[in-house]
Amino acid sequence: MSDRPPLPPFTRETAAQKVQAAEDAWNTRDPHRVALAYSEDSVWRNRDTFVTGRAEIVAFLAAKWAREQDYALRKDLWAFDGNRIAVRFQYECRDAEGQCWRSYGNELWEFDEHGLMTRREASINDVPIEEKERRLVGPRHASERGLSFPLQ
């Protein structure tokens, strides 16, 4: 098995790198690429859905991104300790009927010694928004990296 740096135990710098790598990967909307960051037996809780293993992660993400069009995500490091990282995030998307959504959440991550995520717990709340209220569309600019996003 090859390592997926940065590896735990995390420092502020390496935890922030892990968070940015996750944001970048999720914004590709490529379930297979995203799944490579998780261990073969990774366990997720995503809202009310429980997922185990890479194959289920790929299926979950493929269905998610089929539903959530124009998906754009931002993640911020909240805390870290040893092999664990806490993240807050928000993402925006559009559903099949054209309604735009902003979703806010928190994630708890746990990693193995190879830097693969073994556990992900996500709590998420959705808010309907107007198209003109979207603010996360497009890649994050270098000047925005490391800055916290507004909560409203």
Image (cartoon, rainbow, N blue to C red):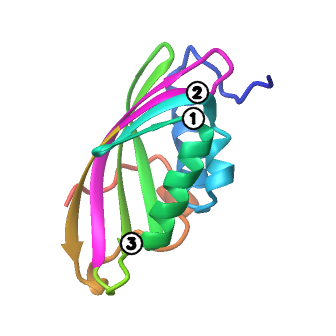
151 left or right, relative to 73:
left
Which residue is identified by label 1?
53
Identify the secondary structure beneath mark 3: strand
First in residue order: circle 3 vs circle 1: 1
Query: Which residue is at 48% across, 13% downward?
Result: 82
Identify the secondary structure beneath mark 1: loop
Query: Which residue is at 38% across, 72% downward?
Result: 93
Residue type at numbered disc 1 = Gly
Q: Is residue 102 inside the magenta stretch?
A: yes
Image location (x, y in percent) of residue 152: 19, 61
Residue type at numbered disc 3 = Cys
**Are the residues tagged 1 and 2 within 8 Å (C-beta)?**
yes
Identify the secondary structure beneath mark 2: strand
Question: Which callout, 2 or 3, points to the residue nearer the camera?
Answer: 2
Residue 93 is tagged as 3
Mark 2 and mark 3: span between their CA atoms?
29 Å
Name the quadrant containing residue 95. bottom left
8 up-or-down from 52: above or below: above
Which residue is identified by label 2?
41
